[in-house]
Image: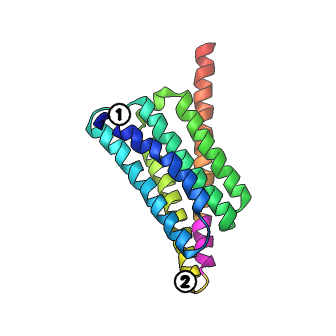
Amino acid sequence: MLLWLPTILGLSRIPLALLLVLVYRPQPDRIILAIVIYALAAITDALDGAIARRLHIASYAGYLLDGFADRTVSVACILAAVFYHHLPLWIACIAIAREFLLATCRLLNPAWYPPSKTERRHSVVVFGTSRIWFLLLLLGALMESNGSQDLRALSWIATSIYGIVVILSFGLLLMLLTRQMGEWIRRVQ
């Protein structure tokens, strides 16, 4: 059972992401529920890899599963932000395209496993920014629903930072994919 724990934790994020999209509304009880779901997803994300490394069962398949679960949670957050927090559609499209591009790069290039220190830092910055951004949106919505002053400025600043990070990350991924495709073409010739 312990050997399956990282897989179970990773897979649990997929229904949590779906649940987040289904239950979230900018109402106090729904926001609190979304925060709990989001926290559970973050905890399972932290635990699955740590347990796999600790048990020495980390694998490429686990890496792909973890990445897919991460992409699922990210897309759920993006959709919630589009529906309820006026995330500009062009930022959402770039962010979702980035998620699919990252999943594709991971799948097409097993050499990315294990990820390099640079790739891990990039992932921590982007995923951390995404988590903080969505959490700020949730907390801002909770404060507004409880009668606090208008927090649109906080939401705008968080979304602007998120948008910049997503655009830069998307560009970096395109560069990596272009470089990888060039290497594949050279090998074929």
Q: Position of residue 119 (x, y in %)?
A: 46, 42
Please say which color scheme the image uses: rainbow
Residue 164 place in picture, x, y as percent: 61, 59
Residue 58, disc: 1
Specify few, some or many for label 2: CA neighbours under 10 Å numbering under 14, 14-19, or 20 or more: few
Across and down, in percent, residue 177 comes to: 60, 34
Q: Quadrant of residue 178?
A: top right
| Type of secondary structure dominating the magenta stretch | helix
Asked if one can make out residue 87 in the rendered structure from this viewpoint, the answer is no
Q: Position of residue 87 (x, y in %)?
A: 67, 63
Q: Is residue 30 above or below residue 1?
A: below
Q: Residue at x 68, y 57 (%)?
A: 91
State the quadrant of the N terminus: top left
Q: At x 57% / y 34%, what residue is drawn?
A: 105
Q: Quadrant of residue 78?
A: bottom right
**Amino acid carrying mark 2 in the image:** Asn
Mark in front: 1 vs 2: 2
Instruction: Tell me what residue is drawn at x 35 percent, y 48 percent.
Output: 47
- Residue that mark 2 sits on: 146
152 or 124, nearer to the observer:
152
| Labels 1 and 2: the sequence-earlier one | 1
